Amino acid sequence: MRLSLAVLSALTLLGSVLAAPSLHPDALQPRDADMAPHAWMDDQALEVLTIPDAASGTRNLTYFEPSIGGVIVHGDMWFPSLDDLLEFETSSQQGKDHAMTYTNRPWPKATVPFRYVSDEAERKTKSKVEFAINAWGSGAPYLQFVRIVPNGEGSTGIIRISAREDGCYASGVGYRKPTDRYRVNLANACSKGNTVHEFGHILGFAHEHQRPDRENHIHFVCANVDPGPKCTMPPQRNCCDQNLPNGCCKNRYQFSYQVGMTFDGPYDLDSVMHYAKWAFALPGRDTLVPVAGGKTMPDLTPSTPSRLDFAALCRSYPKECKR
Ligand SMILES: [Zn+2]
């Protein structure tokens, strides 16, 4: 990938030390080792928020507050505050500038500056970060990932990479403005594949399985959602039902549609932005199953971007991509 030469004095350019892109053995994660939902959500800490929705009147979102502050919604998308989340969710359904990333919210000049918040964060996450940068760079050489040194907190308009132990998550999709805060957090258990996914959010991707046309390709089985450890599910009922006891089935809203977002291009089961078929599922069951005649989802989550991911990214950065 190309690296910026315009920031020589302040920046360390990482590209020259990156290994060639490859499919690392960690890329293919066994079912139990690579949880598709990325934040370690204590069920008690989950909140359900009801917001206005242009299509259905209201819709629910599941969110929680991570240790770094702010809120996480849709499993692993971080926003600096609840107000930022609401602004994103309500403007996206109006098709404003938060419409799905394929045509919006690219980083200026396809350049993504990042900084480790501490030497410890660098030590813990560097190999995964480099894997993700290489994975995206392998099919999008026009992207420039620019490391800022020294390590430390502070700074807006750049990705701050931390290693807190409460999950894998990243700033909600794409670039907004230079005064915004951007984060990637990678707990020790976050795989390289998880990291590629989180960088996908940074680059501007939402979740493929939350596309409004999802049900044409893959079916969400609400009955297979794990009700959660604090839930005492009444007999004969499941997470499809309404008026369940408090604390039950909060994760069913992780599959809400991203209403109003513009998803163009074919639906992509191989996208690194698609959750695994067992996301938030009861043991041994799947929450995402093929529609009749549809393509079977792989057992293993992909750890590198798909051909269609790169095609979508190219549409988001048409000037730099020039294909
Ligand atoms: Zn995600």
Image (cartoon, rainbow, N blue to C red):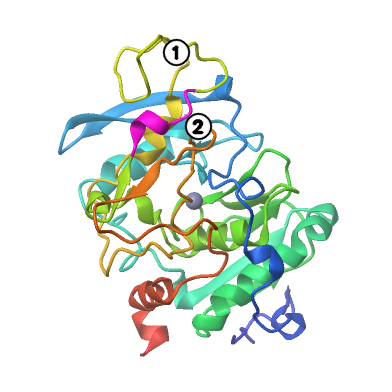
Q: Where is residue 247 in the image (x, y as percent from the top left)?
A: 47, 15
Question: Depth check: 232 or 150 in front?
Answer: 232
| Left or right of residue 177, residue 86 in this image | left
Question: Magenta segment: does it hold 222?
Answer: yes
Residue 149 image-quadrant placement: bottom right
> Is label 1 within 8 A of ligand 1 (CB to nearest ligand atom)?
no
Q: Residue at x 52, y 79 (%)?
A: 143
> On screen, 19 above or below 155?
below
| Left or right of residue 288, residue 190 in this image | right
> On screen, 65 above or below 196?
above
What's the residue type where badge 2 is placed?
A: Leu
Query: Quick one: SS at disc 2?
Result: loop
Question: Magenta segment: does it hold 249?
Answer: no
Disc number at residue 43?
A: none
* Dot 2 alpha-carbon crowd within 10 angstroms: few under 14, some 14 to 19, many 20 or more: some
> On screen, 227 above or below 170?
above
What's the residue type where badge 1 is placed?
A: Met
Query: Quick one: SS at disc 1?
Result: loop
Q: Where is residue 277 in the image (x, y as percent from the top left)?
A: 45, 48
* Dot 1 alpha-carbon crowd within 10 angstroms: few under 14, some 14 to 19, many 20 or more: some
Q: Name the residue under label 2.
A: 282
Question: Depth check: 137 or 222 in front?
Answer: 222
Disc number at residue 233?
A: 1
Question: Depth check: 4 or 9 in front?
Answer: 4
Q: What stretch is highlighted in magenta?
A: 221-227
